Amino acid sequence: MWIYYLSRRESAPTPAFGAVMDTLVQRYRDAVASDWEWLRQEDPAVLLYKVFVLLPAVRASRPREELPPEVRRLDAAMGREESIEELLRRRKGAAEEVRRWREEAAGEVRISSEPPVALAEAMRRHPYLVLLGEPGAGKTTTLQYLAWAFATGRAADPQVLGLAEGRVPVLLRLNAVGEKLVQRKPPRLLRALADEVAERLLIQPEEALDLVESWRKAGRLLVLLDGLDEVTGEREREAVVEAVRKFVWAEETSPPPPTPSPSPTGRGTRFVKSGVVG
C-alpha cells in the first residue's frame, strides 16, 4: 500500500472565511472518524483502537541503479507531465521492456539490516512511504489506524502514534477509483481525493477540490492509498502509478507551505501507500 480555500483567491482569507474552512475541516474529521474507528471485518464490529497494535517499521528498498534505462525515462516523463503512451510510442518495444523488468523485479525487495523504528519515526523522516507486506499482514488496517488517529486529533498521543502534526487524512481505496483515474482530466489524483471529501461532506466536487488544494498548500494533507495490488487492470494500474508520480512531482516543485506551518516536522504533503511483497 502506498503510505489541499474553498475559493481560489489571491488575497488573504478573511476571519469569516477562515471560520468556514475550520468548520468544514471539523465536519470532515467527524464524518471519517466515526467510520474509521471500527474494524468492520469482524462480526460484530470492534473498535479499532482497542485491538490494534502498531508494529515497528523496517526499511526495504530496491537500488535505483538497478532500474533499466526505459524505467528511469518513464520516471522522468512523469515529472515532465508526459504520458506513458507518449514515451512508449517513441520507443518501439519499450512497453515490453518495462513490463519484463517489473515482472522480474517484483520479488526483489531488499530488507535493511538497520534496526526497526516506530512507524511515526519513519513518517517523520520520510514524506513518502510504501508499506510492504504479505496479504493479510495488516497493511489496510494500518492505513485505517493512521487515518483514524489524525482524524480524531489523537495522533500526537504517544500511546496512539506520537506524531504531533495537524494533518487532515484522506484515505482512498485504489480498486474503487482506478477506472476514474483513467477517465479524469489532470490533476487526476487530486480530483480523486476531492471526490472522497465531497462524498463525505455532501458538497460539490469543485468545492471539495478547492478545499483539498488548500490543505495541500498549507502542508496539512495526509494521503493514504490502499490496495494497489487489487487494481487488476493494466490500464488502471498505469493510470494510478502515473497519477501518483505526477502528484508527488508537483508537490516537490511547489513552494513550501507558509510559516508558521501546522506541520512543523514536515515540509508538505505526507504520502503513505501499501503494496504486496512477492
Image: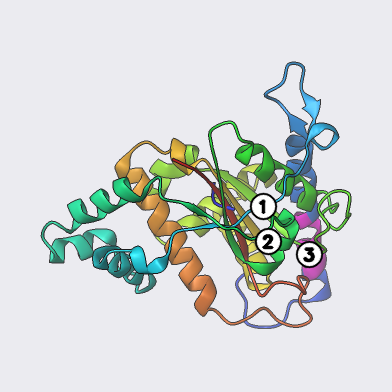
Image position, residue 234 (x, y; %) = 31, 42
Q: Position of residue 132 (x, y in %)?
A: 55, 46
- Number of other residues with Cα within 10 Å of mark 3, as a class: few under 14, some 14 to 19, many 20 or more: many
Magenta-colored span: 18-25
The type of residue carrying mark 1 is: Ala
Disc 2 versus disc 3: nearer the observer: 2
What is the spatial separation of the Cα atoms under label 2 and label 3, in whole angstroms?
Answer: 14 Å
Question: Does the rendering let one see residue 220?
Answer: no
Label 3–label 1 contact, CB within 8 A: no
Q: Is residue 41 above or below residue 256?
A: above
Name the foreground residue: 6 vs 236: 236
Q: Mark 2 or mark 3, which has the lower sequence index?
A: 2
Which one is in front, 188 or 173?
A: 173
Disc 2: CA contacts within 10 A as few (<14), some (14-19) or many (>=20): some
Name the residue beneath numbered marker 3: 165
- Residue at mark 2: 122
> Please, what is the three-letter code of the amino acid marked with disc 2?
Ala
Q: Residue at x 79, y 49 (%)?
A: 149
The answer to whether one can see residue 230 in this image is yes
Disc on res. 205: none
Front label number (3 vs 1)? 1
Check whether the beta carbons of the residues at disc 1 and disc 2 lie within 8 A of each other.
yes
Rendered view: 172 above or below 17: above
| Magenta-drawn stretch, dominant element (helix, strand or loop) | helix
Q: What residue type is disc 3 on?
A: Glu
Label 1 sits on residue: 57
